[in-house]
Image: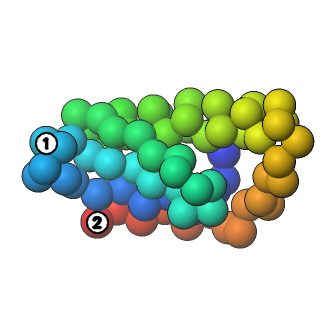
Amino acid sequence: MYKYETIVYWSDEDDAFIAEVPQLAGCTAHGASAQKALSNVNEAIKLWIDTAHEFGDNIPECKGQRLMLA
């Protein structure tokens, strides 16, 4: 599990929980439950980091371990 700050919230528009990682531009995922959104965003973080490595992009260090459920 990655330790990037993650914000999880319910979206009526998407009819799903959304998990966003503010430090990683565009890194989001969704799921039918908050736990599933978190699981999915961890996979999205891995893919984001793998892609950054592939293109030689900078990977931000984790700022903290906060988890927000809204």
Say if mark 1 contacts mark 2, CB within 8 Å.
no
Does dot 2 land on a helix, a strand or a loop? loop
Picture coordinates of residue 12, whole percent (x, y): 11, 52
Drawn side of residue 5 relative to residue 54, left or right: left
Residue appearing at x 13%, y 50% in the figure? 13
Picture coordinates of residue 34, whole percent (x, y): 31, 44
Q: Which of marks 1 and 2 is nearer the N terminus?
A: 1
Does dot 1 land on a helix, a strand or a loop? loop
Residue appearing at x 88%, y 42% in the figure? 56
Drawn side of residue 37 relative to residue 32, left or right: right
Q: Hey, which quadrant is residue 31 in on the image?
A: top left
**Circle 2 is placed at which residue position?**
70
Task: Please tell me whether mark 1 or mark 2 is closer to you in this view.
Answer: 1
Q: How crowded is mark 2: few (under 14 residues within 10 Å), some or many (20 or more)?
A: few
- Residue type of the residue flagged with mark 1: Asp
Question: Which image quarter holds the C terminus?
Answer: bottom left
Viewer-nearest residue: 65 or 18: 18
The numbered mark at residue 15 is: 1
Residue appearing at x 46%, y 34% in the figure? 39
Residue appearing at x 83%, y 48% in the figure? 57
For the question of whether residue 38 can be seen, the reply is no
Picture coordinates of residue 6, whole percent (x, y): 50, 57
Q: Hey, which quadrant is residue 33 in on the image?
A: top left
